[in-house]
Amino acid sequence: MLMQTWSFFKKSLANNIFRGLELREFSVFYQPKMDMETRKIKGLEALARWHSPGIGWIPPSEFIPIAESTGAIIDLGEWVLFSACEQMKHWRENGFSEISVSVNLSPTQLEEKNLISSVEDILAKTGVEPRLLELEITESVFIKDSSRALAVIKELKKLGVRLAIDDFGTGYSSVGYLTAFPFDCLKIDQSFSRTIQLPQTQVVIRALTSLSRQLGLTTVLEGVESETEMVMAGHLGCDQIQGYAVGRPMQANAVTLKMRDFQMNSATLPLLE
Ligand code: G
Ligand code: MN
């Protein structure tokens, strides 16, 4: 694409997000998470993807920050949540009644006063069991205004949904957040997978999984790309892994096939011992 076209496009990107939502240019992709013990797909992370007819695929690293800074993330986030819950209903009707889906909540969404009622509404409309919905929150939320964030998070928790702390171990991650907020799941950032061969990284992951287990949280290692990394994640005490080694983010129908595959034959993945 021409640079000129790109910079022009960037300027009007925020408006294009709203228009793109109306024109159904967005879709939700799902990335599987595998349980280390059963080697089955336990959950999926819902990820927004954007295909604009004139431009092609626009990476989330481009549109999420703009959506975030312009407030378009409120509409986009709500749409992703609704789509993911609708899809869960389809999966339930097709025999995958225990599959859980996690949806990312951005800092802006957490500040929005309609958030609680909007989540409640979507759960009611789609009939999704709250325990099967997980909301992923990044730590930047807590740095800004932690008392407000805590109030909102407690309200979400009351709805019966699960809560995950996302991208843990980067930035200003504080272990204090793990006890101060009612999280159910700790997602270790994918940068740890990139250096998992280093002894010092292994020490940190082991410490995190041990801490997490003692606090009663589930630990997921993100960005696991190879079989070697997968085996190591198991040895270091991770409960679940997510990453290309299990599957890339994919369309709902592709993930359905993948889940069937795992259900019938978990040996498609290497044995861990
Ligand atoms: O911040 P969060 O963890 O929600 O971001 C997930 C992003 O990471 C997605 O956009 C997804 O496409 C990407 N991703 C998922 N698995 C892998 C992986 O194994 N390797 C790399 N490099 N990126 C991944
Ligand atoms: Mn996430």
Image (tube, rainbow, N blue to C red):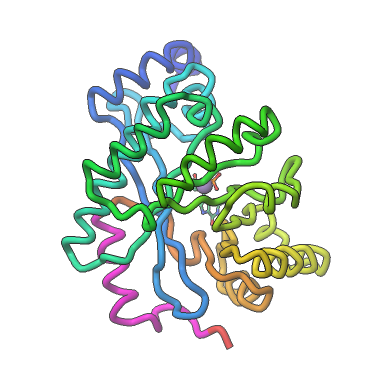
Q: In the drawing, does residue 55 fall left or right of residue 169?
A: left
Residue 173 drawn above or below residue 207 = above
User: In the image, is residue 5 above or below residue 240?
Assistant: above
The quadrant holding residue 171 is: top right
Q: Which residue range is magenta in the image?
A: 253-271
Compared with 168, 146 (above or below) is above
Going 68% across and 69% down the picture, which residue do you hit? 214
**Left or right: 264, with 204 as reference point:** left
- In the image, what residue occupies the spot 41% across and 34% down? 116
Position of residue 192 measured from the top left corner of the image (x, y, whole percent): 69, 58
Which quadrant of the figure contains the N terminus?
A: top left
Residue 228: in magenta span: no
Q: Looking at this view, name the residue that lies furthest to the left.
A: 93
How many numbered discs, if any? Answer: 0
Judging depth in this view, the residue of 138 and 248 nearest the camera is: 138
Our reading of the magenta stretch's main secondary structure is helix
Q: Residue at x 45, y 77 (%)?
A: 39
| Image spot of residue 130 (x, y percent) | 36, 52
The verdict on residue 255 being magenta is yes
In-front residue for pair 175/18: 175
Residue 153, image quadrant: top right
Residue 162: x %, y % from top left: 47, 53
**Which quadrant of the view contains residue 18?**
top left
Please state, as top left, top right, bottom left or bottom right, where the C terminus lies in the image.
bottom right
Residue farthest toward the bottom in the current orientation of the protein: 273
